[in-house]
Image (cartoon, rainbow, N blue to C red):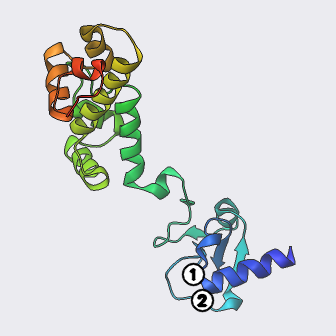
Amino acid sequence: MIIEAEKWERAWAERDPAFDGRFFVCVRTTGVYCRCTCPVRLPFRRNVHFVPSAAAAEAAGFRPCLRCRPETIPFSPAWNGTLATVERGLRLIIEDGALDGEDSTVERLAARLGVTERHLRRLFAHHLGASPSAVARTARVQRAKRLLTDTDLTMTEIAMAAGFGSLRRFNAAFADVYGRPPSAIRRGPRKR
């Protein structure tokens, strides 16, 4: 345990990101606990002790630092912040077809994620550079392309299975993305 404490002390003094979330720094004079990478001025060593978890720090009566948010250990959804919301939205769009069908809207998707429609659009634009509707359209086109190349379903069956509301939307999306109709993709690559 002494060797571990020496490692923690060195990591704290150097603010080593490799140790982020592996131990926490409790400051007796302020009653606050931090991550070892916290950007605040380092307190005197005599006022500090180390604990292996955020729960241990809270059990000892320390409260989390408002600057480095130690209660959100690395790679937790809270640590990822708004990216976690975007990732959940992506999963719902791609895996569950959350924006496929006539009654599926970005507003309903946002409600499922616990944010407003406007905020969801901003998050998608910030993290992905595209709107939720554009991401859904791309997912539908990719699903349809796999069905075109891997199955013998009819065009209408593929359009419905991929999440397009109609054969017309299916054909229009393929023309936009690939510059040719879906039947040309099924036949094989276009000769130039």
Amino acid carrying label 2: it is: Pro
Residue located at (29% from left, 9% from top): 157
Q: Is residue 28 something that shows in the picture?
A: no
* Disc 2 to disc 1: CB gap under 8 Å: yes
28 to 81, vertically: above or below: below
Give the number of the mark in front: 2 or 1: 2
Callout 2: few (<14), some (14-19), or many (20+) C-alpha neighbours within 10 Å?
Answer: few
- Given residues 91 and 34, the one toward you in this image is 91
Is 117 or 155 nearer to us in this picture? 155
Decide if residue 125 is on the left or right side of residue 54: left
Mark 1, Cα crowd under 10 Å, few <14 / some 14-19 / many 20+, is: few
Residue 124 location, x and y as percent?
A: 28, 48
User: In the image, is residue 41 above or below residue 152?
Assistant: below
Going from N to C along the chain, the mark reached first, 2 or 1, is: 1
Quadrant location, the C terminus: top left
Q: Is residue 44 left or right of residue 111?
A: right
**Residue 7 percent across, percent down from the top left:** 75, 79
- Left or right of 2 on screen, residue 106: left
**Looking at the image, is 74 positioned above or below residue 142?**
below
Q: Which residue is mark 2?
A: 43
In the image, 91 versus 47, the foreground residue is 91
Determine if residue 173 is in view.
yes
Residue at numbered disc 1? 30
Instruction: From the top left corner, tell me how far across and down residue 61 is, in percent.
Output: 65, 68
Q: CA distance from mark 2 to mark 1?
A: 10 Å
As drawn, 26 above or below 92: below
Secondary structure category for the residue under label 1: loop
